[in-house]
Amino acid sequence: MLEFAPTTSAQYELGFTSFMSDDIRFSDEADPSRAIFRCEDCGAVVRGREEARKHMREHGYENEVAIWANVEELAERLDDRTAILWSVGIRLRLTPPGQPRVEDLVTIGDMVWTNYSPEKGRVVRVDRYEVHGLPCYSIIYVPLDAKPLKDGRYRESDYCYLNELVAQDGRILHLYETNDDEVFYKRRQATIMDYLRG
Ligand SMILES: [Zn+2]
């Protein structure tokens, strides 16, 4: 099976760092007292940074790094399209109910490219997972001219990863609202039709 690439984004890392520092904020919306944390030891969900700290100390975690390494901040849903990480005030995208998800828009064999790189690739896998308690996707693709090995796989260096993706209004965007990345796609069938039409 294809190895799954790490999906932790720079912003997530910044968010993590901010749990330990009481000053870092990404917007005026930040309100650490409203931040929701899930304890990875017992699964408890706790609201408020101070409460989370207290909870983790009851598990025996004393230093800040250990405390925040063992909790995940969960985003709170604001409306059908938006959730927020209260610790830093970052807004996250949601797929509105009834709209196609990334897995409905893109499948194996489709062509993808991005707004920051016009180079097209062929999708070999679409993965669903959760970040901050919200569903998001990775699209794994290979260059159009990549040659599969005998077992059908590709060389490790051929695999490219687009991570933390969410669909909105038929577009594929990054989970973080402040991130302008967009993934464009063309269904495989359309590609064959185009080819037949010449
Ligand atoms: Zn706990």
Image (spheres, rainbow, N blue to C red):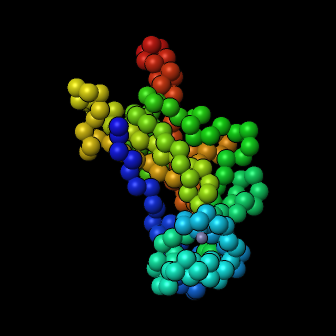
Taking 101 as reference, is 186 above or below it? above
Q: Where is residue 36 in the image (x, y as percent from the top left)?
A: 67, 69
Residue 114 falls left or right of residue 73: left
Residue 83 falls left or right of residue 196: right
Q: Ligand 1 sits in which quadrant?
A: bottom right
Q: Where is residue 190 in the image (x, y as percent from the top left)?
A: 51, 22
Q: Residue pushed farthest right? A: 79
Residue at 67% x, 42% y is: 169
Q: Where is residue 126 in the image (x, y as percent from the top left)?
A: 48, 39
Residue at 47% x, 14% y is: 197
Taking 96 as reference, is 196 above or below it? above
Residue at 44% x, 55% y is: 7
Image quadrant holding the N terminus, namely: top left
Asked whether residue 5 is in view, the answer is yes
Q: Which of 46 and 179 is in front in this view?
A: 46
Residue at 45% x, 66% y is: 10
The quadrant in which residue 3 appears is top left
